[in-house]
Image: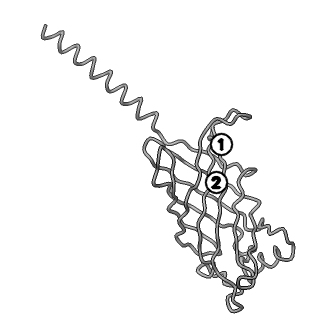
């Protein structure tokens, strides 16, 4: 009987370890590649000290998002082609690309990297990150208003999508054009992103 009890205990221990191992495996981080055709970081900037608000976007973006819903962790990296800036106004585009502002010839890429935080019901609600723009890196926090992972009904791939926003002062990044004329320096950044599970 004693030997039988030991055997039963050992079997239960092995099964318990197997279940635990399976749970750990299921909780592994999942990596997603950003879909450039459905990801367009956009922004809002002041024109002439409150005269109007100009809105634009970047037409070329790449990067990755990694999520572990069970652990409540994750991170993202978004690379933005600054030469793809688009206000819907050719003259404004050219000026923004010039050395007066983004100087895209010298700084052709902006990068936002961060950690997904404050998970609620398996979804992050904030990003603690760093924006590198115009050769300067500063912390920029984003609020996530929407985050969803699901199977895409058309491609049948596992996808995640999010909508996040934050603000920063462009003068902090050395892009202070118009400050002396009264242009407000605050920029509202909105990142609309969709990503497909990496193969």
Front residue of 77/169: it is: 169
Mark sitting earlier along the chain (2/1)? 2
Q: Secondary structure at mark 1?
A: strand
Whether residue 74 sits left or right of residue 58 in the image: it is: left
Front residue of 26/182: it is: 182
- Residue hosting label 2: 63
Q: Position of residue 117 (x, y in %)?
A: 47, 55
Q: Secondary structure at mark 2?
A: strand
Q: Residue at x 62, y 40 (%)?
A: 197
Front residue of 180/197: it is: 180
User: Quarter holding the C terminus?
Assistant: top right
- Residue hosting label 1: 196
Where residue 107 sits, quadrant-wise, is bottom right
Is the residue marked by circle 1 packed among few (<14), some (14-19), or many (20+) residues within 10 Å? many
Where residue 18 sits, quadrant-wise, is top left
Q: Position of residue 154 (x, y in %)?
A: 74, 34
Residue 195 lies, with reference to residue 145, above or below; the image says: above
Q: Position of residue 172 (x, y in %)?
A: 58, 80
Residue 23 lies, with reference to residue 110, above or below; the image says: above
Residue positioned most to the bottom? 180
Front residue of 176/189: it is: 189
Whether residue 15 sits left or right of residue 2 in the image: it is: right
Residue positioned most to the top? 1
Residue 16 lies, with reference to residue 189, above or below; the image says: above
Q: Residue at x 74, y 64 (%)?
A: 57
User: Quarter holding the N terminus?
Assistant: top left
Where residue 169 sits, quadrant-wise, is bottom right
Disc number lying in front (2 or 1): 1
């Amino acid at each position: 009987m004693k030997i039988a009890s030991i055997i039963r205990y050992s079997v239960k221990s092995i099964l318990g370890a197997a279940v635990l191992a399976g749970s750990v495996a299921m909780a592994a981080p999942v990596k997603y590649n950003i879909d450039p055709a459905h990801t367009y970081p956009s922004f809002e900037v002041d024109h002439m000290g409150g005269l109007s608000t100009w809105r634009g976007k970047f037409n070329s973006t790449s990067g990755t998002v990694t999520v572990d819903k069970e652990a409540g962790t994750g991170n993202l990296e978004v690379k933005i082609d600054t030469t793809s800036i688009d206000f819907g106004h050719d003259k404004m585009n050219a000026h923004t690309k010039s050395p007066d502002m983004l100087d895209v010839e010298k700084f052709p890429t902006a990068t936002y990297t961060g950690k997904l935080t404050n998970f609620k019901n398996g979804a992050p609600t904030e990003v603690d990150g760093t924006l590198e723009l115009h050769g300067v890196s500063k912390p920029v926090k984003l609020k996530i208003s929407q985050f969803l992972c699901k199977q895409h009904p058309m491609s049948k791939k596992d996808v995640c999508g999010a909508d996040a926003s934050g603000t920063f002062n462009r003068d902090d990044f050395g892009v202070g054009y118009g400050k002396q004329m009264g242009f407000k320096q605050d920029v509202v950044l909105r990142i609309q992103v969709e990503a497909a599970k990496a193969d």
